[in-house]
């Protein structure tokens, strides 16, 4: 693979098969402990995020009495989230993946803990919610980028296949997505929202503690991360994605998925269940999506090393396309739930592949910026997709579902035909940056 030039820094590349059982520079107990601590940190952080997604809108409504205020808070935090994704990837590469994971989780914990503190002292209003929500976004997004970037380091240190570890991580995401909102709802029935936020802050603090216990050698900043001028570093991730056909294709597919799934979860499904008088089935449908993601990711983790990545990828396109066609029929709430399970199954098969692709195609010193670019683009376009879906749904809810299905089918057709995705099973590439000329 020809890696893109990075200004004055050139790249020497050597291509080889990564041996998941190769000896790690860290041996014995600490090796296994690193993997467990990473998964615990990721699960705790995801659990905190799932709690805040339920508790914060509830608290906004309780304190302001305005149903539109929750939408204002969400919109006000979107721009900081996009900026944090772009700049955060650069910070991850400059400072170090493990270190930024710790700082971000601690910052998230403080931002969430500040909400009940302000409520008890100055009193919460819309301005405070916007300010603290934006502050939380500035920490959450770099933390997400840092953990994604840290995944290959943890797999290498633990002697575990990156495919398998990525599958296990996505399976934990499915469990959290399934259990988190339900647990948050139960907590709100027993405790005040501010008390639940204290538990949410504690989850982020636990994530920071687990990452802190990972050996410092895991996820350390690349020695070449500071070799470029700062202005070029900020655009480094965009240049890497633009120069690699596989990374471009993965990014386009991520955009297409977000443009479909975001409106479905945030708008179309709640609107349809409310019109059918089956609002209680909405929770079942979203749980079916999470369960499908868990099953798909678990299948990939178990089959890692035996299933080709392209096979998992094509199965993903087939499953999600089938699920979207079922969903467009809107035949019955149970059919809709089944459709979302099938969509989740396909998503779970593909999601673990993305970190593996990035790890194999991107120089270590650019990994955070590449994830940052992908996250920023998705965060920028997802709200726009929700707004567009709302405009279509205002005329016809059924046509909004048809449009979402057509958009996914177009994305799947692109994914099946684009040449870049044919190299999913090429040998992984490790790149060493050096001020010499570029060779592969």
Image (cartoon, helix red, strand yellow):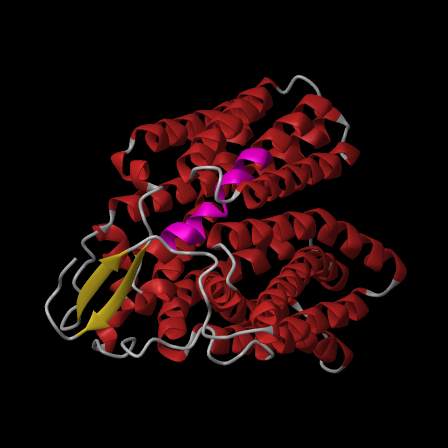
Residue ranking furthest to the left: 437
Residue at 40% in and 29% down: 412
Magenta-tinted stretch: 345-358
- Please say if 222 is above or below 414: below
Residue 225 can be seen, yes or no: yes
Type of secondary structure dominating the magenta stretch: helix
Give the image location of residue 299, x and y in percent.
59, 39
Give the image location of residue 26, x and y in percent.
50, 75
Q: Residue 220, located in which quarter of the rendered image?
A: bottom left
Quarter of the picture holding the C terminus: bottom left
In the rendered picture of this protein, how many numbered marks are placed on residues? Answer: 0
Q: Nearer the viewer, residue 281 or 30?
A: 30
Give the image location of residue 437, x and y in percent.
10, 68
Q: Residue 430, located in which quarter of the rendered image?
A: bottom left
Q: Does residue 287 appear to the left or right of 135 in the view shown?
A: right
Q: Nearer the viewer, residue 438 or 58?
A: 438
Give the image location of residue 64, x and y in percent.
71, 62
Is residue 294 magenta-colored? no
Q: Nearer the viewer, residue 329 or 10?
A: 10
Q: Does residue 299 appear to the left or right of 369 in the view shown?
A: right
Is residue 355 magenta-colored? yes
Residue ranking furthest to the right: 190
Residue at 19% in and 66% down: 11
């Amino acid at each position: 693979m020809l890696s893109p030039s990075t200004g004055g820094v050139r790249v020497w590349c050597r291509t080889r098969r990564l041996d998941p059982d190769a000896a790690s520079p860290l041996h014995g107990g600490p090796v296994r402990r690193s993997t467990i601590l990473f998964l615990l940190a990721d699960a705790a952080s995801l659990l905190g995020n799932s709690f805040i997604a339920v508790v914060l809108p509830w608290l906004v409504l309780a304190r302001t009495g305005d149903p539109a205020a929750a939408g204002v808070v969400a919109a006000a935090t979107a721009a900081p989230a996009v900026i944090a994704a772009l700049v955060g990837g650069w910070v991850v590469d400059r400072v170090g993946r493990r270190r930024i994971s710790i700082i971000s989780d601690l910052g998230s914990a403080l931002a969430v803990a500040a909400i009940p503190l302000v409520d008890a002292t100055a009193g919460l209003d819309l301005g405070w919610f916007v300010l603290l929500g934006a502050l939380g976004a500035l920490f959450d997004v770099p933390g997400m980028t840092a953990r994604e970037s840290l995944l290959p380091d943890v797999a290498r240190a633990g002697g575990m296949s990156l495919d398998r570890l990525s599958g296990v991580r996505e399976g934990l995401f499915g469990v959290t997505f399934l259990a988190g909102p339900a647990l948050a709802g139960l907590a709100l029935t027993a405790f005040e929202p501010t008390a639940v936020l204290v538990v949410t802050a504690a989850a982020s603090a636990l994530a920071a503690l687990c990452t802190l216990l990972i050996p410092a050698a895991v996820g350390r900043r690349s020695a070449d991360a500071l070799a470029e001028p700062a202005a070029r570093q900020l655009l480094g991730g965009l240049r890497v994605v633009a120069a690699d056909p596989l990374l471009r294709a993965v990014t386009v597919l991520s955009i297409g998925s977000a443009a479909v799934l975001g409106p479905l979860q945030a708008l179309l499904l709640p609107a349809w269940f409310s019109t059918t008088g089956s609002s209680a089935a909405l929770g079942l449908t979203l749980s079916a999506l999470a369960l499908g993601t868990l099953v798909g990711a678990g299948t990939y983790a178990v089959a890692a090393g035996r299933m080709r990545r392209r096979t998992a990828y094509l199965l993903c396109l087939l499953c999600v396309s089938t699920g979207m066609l079922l969903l467009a029929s809107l035949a019955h709430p149970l059919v809709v739930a089944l459709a979302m399970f099938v969509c989740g199954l396909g998503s779970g098969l593909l999601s673990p592949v993305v970190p593996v692709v990035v790890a194999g195609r991107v120089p270590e010193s650019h990994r955070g910026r590449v994830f940052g670019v992908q996250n920023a683009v998705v965060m920028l376009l997802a709200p726009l997709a929700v707004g567009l879906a709302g405009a279509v749904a205002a005329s016809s809810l059924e046509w909004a579902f048809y449009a979402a299905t057509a958009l996914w089918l177009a994305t799947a057709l692109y994914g099946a035909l684009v040449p870049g995705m044919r190299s999913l099973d090429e040998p992984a590439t490790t790149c060493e940056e050096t001020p010499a000329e570029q060779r592969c």
